[in-house]
Amino acid sequence: MSKQVDFNNFLSNIEPSNTTVSYISSVQTNLRAYLQTHDKYKMYI
């Protein structure tokens, strides 16, 4: 039983928080939008 508790603690320590996931998602969305309108890079998106 202790191994399971330790493993669950490990998973919770390496899982990104909801705030981090939301931030990274918005950064990705903004970067895609920027690249889609950039003259040099829009052909790659």
Image (spheres, helix red, strand yellow):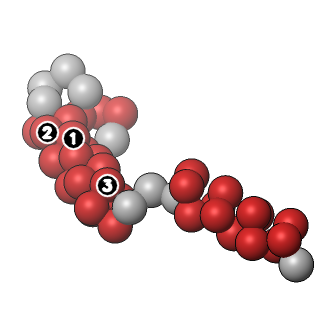
Mark 2 or 3, closer to the camera: 3
Which residue position holds label 1? 31
Q: Are marks 1 and 2 in contact (CB under 8 Å)?
A: yes
Graded by Cα atoms within 10 Å as few (under 14), some (14 to 19) or many (20 or more), the crowding at tag 2 reads few
- Figure quadrant of the C terminus: top left
Eyeballing the image, is 45 above or below 5? above
Tell me the CA gap for discs 1 and 3.
16 Å
Farthest residue to the front: give it. Answer: 2
Which residue position holds label 3? 20
Residue 40, x across and y down, in percent: 20, 21
Q: Secondary structure at mark 3?
A: helix
User: Can residue 25 be seen from the camera position used here?
Assistant: no
The residue shown at (14%, 39%) is: 34
Mark 1 or 3, closer to the camera: 3
User: Which of disc 3 and disc 1 is earlier in sequence?
Assistant: 3
Residue 9 is left or right of residue 39, and the answer is right
